[in-house]
Amino acid sequence: MIDGFIALYIFMLAAFTGYEVIARVPVILHTPLMSGSNFVHGIVLVGAMVALGRATTPVGQVIGFIGVVLAAGNAVGGYVVTERMLEMFKASGERKP
Amino acid sequence: MIDGFIALYIFMLAAFTGYEVIARVPVILHTPLMSGSNFVHGIVLVGAMVALGRATTPVGQVIGFIGVVLAAGNAVGGYVVTERMLEMFKASGERKP
Amino acid sequence: MSDLISPSAASVLIQASYFVAAFLFIIGLKRMSSPRTARGGILWAGAGMLVATVVTFAWPGMQNYVLMLAGIGVGGVLAWITGKRVAMTDMPQMIALYNGMGGGAAAAIAAVELYKGGEHPLALYVLAVLGGLIGAVSFSGSLIAFAKLQGLIKRSIRYGGQQVVNLVILVGTLAVGALIIFNHDAGATAVTLFFLLALALGLLMTLPIGGADMPVVISLYNALTGLAVAFEGFVLNNAAMIIAGTVVGAAGTLLTQLMARAMNRSLGNVLFSGFGETAAAGGGEVQGSMKPIEASDAAVMMAFAQKAIVVPGYGMAVAQAQHKIWELAQQLQSRGVKVKFAIHPVAGRMPGHMNVLLAEAGVPYDLIHDLEEINAEFDTADVALIIGANDVVNPAARSDRSSPIFGMPILNADKAKNVIVIKRGQGTGFSGIENALFYLDQTRMLYGDGQAVAGQLVHAVKSV
Amino acid sequence: MSDLISPSAASVLIQASYFVAAFLFIIGLKRMSSPRTARGGILWAGAGMLVATVVTFAWPGMQNYVLMLAGIGVGGVLAWITGKRVAMTDMPQMIALYNGMGGGAAAAIAAVELYKGGEHPLALYVLAVLGGLIGAVSFSGSLIAFAKLQGLIKRSIRYGGQQVVNLVILVGTLAVGALIIFNHDAGATAVTLFFLLALALGLLMTLPIGGADMPVVISLYNALTGLAVAFEGFVLNNAAMIIAGTVVGAAGTLLTQLMARAMNRSLGNVLFSGFGETAAAGGGEVQGSMKPIEASDAAVMMAFAQKAIVVPGYGMAVAQAQHKIWELAQQLQSRGVKVKFAIHPVAGRMPGHMNVLLAEAGVPYDLIHDLEEINAEFDTADVALIIGANDVVNPAARSDRSSPIFGMPILNADKAKNVIVIKRGQGTGFSGIENALFYLDQTRMLYGDGQAVAGQLVHAVKSV
Ligand SMILES: NC(=O)c1ccc[n+]([C@@H]2O[C@H](COP(=O)([O-])OP(=O)(O)OC[C@H]3O[C@@H](n4cnc5c(N)ncnc54)[C@H](OP(=O)(O)O)[C@@H]3O)[C@@H](O)[C@H]2O)c1
Ligand SMILES: NC(=O)c1ccc[n+]([C@@H]2O[C@H](COP(=O)([O-])OP(=O)(O)OC[C@H]3O[C@@H](n4cnc5c(N)ncnc54)[C@H](OP(=O)(O)O)[C@@H]3O)[C@@H](O)[C@H]2O)c1
């Protein structure tokens, strides 16, 4: 396990990064950005895969499987929805094909 | 020693944090901010103290001592100069005592 | 595949890929938060996700690959299809749904680890339990948010002492959690009870909150899922999860605050003090009468205007009228009318709601103007066409201290020479109050469903 | 003191304090980057530094406490006195000096560790060597920057093939560094040689760069010192150093770019392509003649103006005329003249130079206006008083494509009804080119040292 203080440091720095990166975002991007960050925590998929991959009991396998299904839904759904929303933000010039 | 990838993560996150924290700083603060960040790396003082504190050879003690002197100069000088500069940024209302 | 690679080479590859993924996530979010670069941002983040997922198959000593692929297939395909099909107006609930799934996955990870038990450092147990709790709350809470926005649950369920009940359940959940943390033999029953309580908590917390507050709540659950993922990342010693989760947790928290502020509410107000009660109808009496107009007359008025400003609101979303409105605007443009769209930051029911809809209909974004940009221009407009907007053009916000929306900046549609309001009847807006704009001398009401009326206007303008 | 605390309690205390310090540094920098909160920022960061320094005495198993206290005393007191005494105009060189000391300290840490030698992971050696190199370059380079700005070195030393020589030295330093990394028995001679080469490199790199480019160079060395501190932090396994150093390294890199951009130059141009050659005199011929004026006439002109805009430049800093200028402005104000100060982003020789000087003289910052704010107002000004500014009011930047400053936004002082220019003679500004503004019909030249002339004006206005 990552040692205590190092964990704290990583947590602090990641929190600062997350906070600063989206500071001053314009209102019109609130919803796509919410969706985009929703996609990012879809990384839980790799954790669910590992949890399932190491499960040996039936209970573990069932819960692990549910975890993977849900996580894949988060990642894929989050991507598709965000992409569709952001795809729409175009200036008039770009629109005419 | 902090393990390789963890070190990389910390480095990346700290770099993002530093970059984002001062993004969009107005021109008039460039010099005080340069001075302020100059002060912050005065933290090298704690490293110099440890290096001196663990030095056993005369060479180590001499270099360690020089390190401590220089680092203390960085920290103290950086603080004093920054504080003096920032002290001056006041609106007209605040000026009248 | 994992057999082809020596364990240590595999683990360096995995670590390196996770590092790249975390980096790409941050870059992606950074780009998504600026309109110019937003479209590229999701691609960067997506690339990171792909890399991280693929290399995870090489994790040493894993089993159940078939189940794993099946799970990814089922979850991925379902999400892909629903995500591609959903209408733009239904985006908020889909985000809620996918977000809830992420929270559920984090809770599932916690459950797998806690059912397994064993001797681990205390901190690990604490993080597993907290992550499980937060993930489960985010899961069931997001499902309720989805159901409300989708119209599956119509009423906000409220009763006296509700907050006390919720507090008791929270304390109970924490107590069982503490038991699990300090007594590793607490057993499967305790773990099951813990998760049931946590799921109930999310449910009960979210039920009383009104549908219109949901965007803020969804954003909050989004931040919470991020946090849960980060905590489970510590449990699994997975740096990509820790960093992505924490970044989303912090970004989501800020975003939640920004959204609440844009709606002129505080987060505490959304969650607790009002517990979702939409503001009770109030405010002063309104003088005058509403004067109706026919579509043909309104069409003439607009066709001969020099400059028209369109103010869309929630009603346009309900009526799905954005395509017809853009058709109308193009008609007017071809007759030499200067048409602009004015968007209030909280028009509709989610931030950027109108922008997304107009973008969907093909309105170029240089015709679309923010409140600050356009407010000075109403003075010079011959017609302000209000379609399904109400609160965001209510002058009471400027003048009436007793109004629940007092202090919110509004679009000054009342400054235009003529105002045409499209709505179905006497319905009030989100805040439930009267709108003096509708009673002004220069205002005419054009009753009907937004889409139908816009269609009539298009026809009528053609035949002018 | 360290004896009173058990090693492990001490080490938790130290770690916790370092964590707090790193947190405070980031908060401090964040606050320093916004004008409203800047003053508090340095206090937060200072508190962090104090905490970190004090707890370090409790580091287990240390010796040489007397030397340590003596070192802190000597360095601290000297820096305190010089820092308190230095004039505002001399700030850039003091920052260079203190920054160089930090780089030197990082190099000293590297030297202690490398002289000690021993078996460590390869990565540790690499980081120690790189940190030592960067720290030493920053040390000697900053000292040269200090000497140049302080006027101790007057000329920029240049010769053919200079860059080649520097490149050779760089390669040599890296070669010796590689020797140390891969052969831990390389011995003290190699380490000494390595540091001598690194110091020489910093010296030779900085000598050819012109004094006026120094602010950018100092900012670059500041970022480099941060990086060196971070690397040595990895070597000593000291998280506070790693994080503070990296944050400064990244922030400093961005700041360096911003500074270079504000001066309309690229970083590469500052460091290499020009290697500090100030732009050669060039640009078109100028028509007309310079028309001198006496202080008494200039005073009358200003005293009866409705609105006067003061444009200070590098000459005001040289002449230390800011106090007299503010006295003059107050005189004019008491006669009902509306006085504003217009500051160009790169007036003077460091970013914010004029702001700091005017603030020092007591000019309230609501009288001080940026280029964007004030440029439209010159049209309505009766008098523009230029004191020691030249390039920043040169209309060639707007019109003359061949001019080295073409494209830089300038203060439109030529739009004012009357222009009074205070300077000593025919001297050109930083870019070495003629200024057509001085030859315009409405311009009058008021020759003399800035401070002296401002004094005469104060007198003359009093007696109008
Ligand atoms: N944007 C956000 O993020 C967000 C989130 C939560 C809450 N809010 C709140 O929502 C409100 C938004 O204001 P708004 O002006 O956009 O909308 P609004 O005040 O909610 O008014 C919507 C109006 O549209 C009309 N309408 C409904 N369906 C229609 C249809 N099919 N065709 C034509 N008209 C229709 C309704 O009147 P009829 O019934 O008579 O037709 C109603 O008066 C604000 O109070 C804001 O604070 C915003
Ligand atoms: N701000 C920054 O960060 C920075 C950094 C590096 C370079 N630069 C460059 O520096 C320039 C700044 O422009 P600027 O207009 O402020 O200054 P400038 O163009 O350098 O002109 C300064 C003028 O002041 C006069 N002067 C010098 N000493 C004086 C004295 N004692 N009393 C009265 N006048 C005196 C000089 O003329 P006489 O000799 O005839 O008196 C000279 O023409 C720009 O080109 C900018 O790019 C700026």
Image: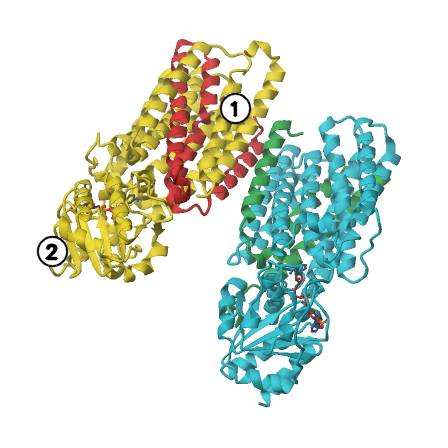
Chain colours: A green, B red, C cyan, D yellow
> In the rendered view, does A60 fall on the left or right side of D452?
right
Q: From the viewer's perspective, is residue A83 above or below residue D333?
A: below
Amino acid type of the residue that numbered disc 2 sits on in the rendered structure: Lys
Q: How far across and down, in percent of the image, does residue B85 sit?
A: 37, 35
Tell me the crowding category of disc 2: few under 14, some 14 to 19, or many 20 or more residues within 10 angstroms, Cα based: some
Side of C78 relative to C437 (left or right):
right
> Can residue D224 be seen here?
no
Q: Residue furthest right?
A: C189
At a point 71% along the width and 68% down the height, the residue shown is: C428
Q: Residue tagged by mark 2? A: D291
The residue identified by callout 1 is D51
D82 or C132, which is in the foreground? D82
Provide the secondary structure element on which disc 1 rests: helix
Q: Image check: D227 left or right of D147?
A: right
Q: Disc 1 sits on a residue from what chain? A: D
Mark 1 or 2, which is nearer the eye?
2
The chain carrying label 2 is D
Location of the N terminus of chain C by quadrant is top right
| Residue drawn at x 82%, y 47% as measured from the top left | C162
Residue type pointed to by label 1: Val
Which residue: 62% across, 17% down?
Answer: D9
**Which of the four quarters of the rendered structure image does ligand 2 lie in?**
top left
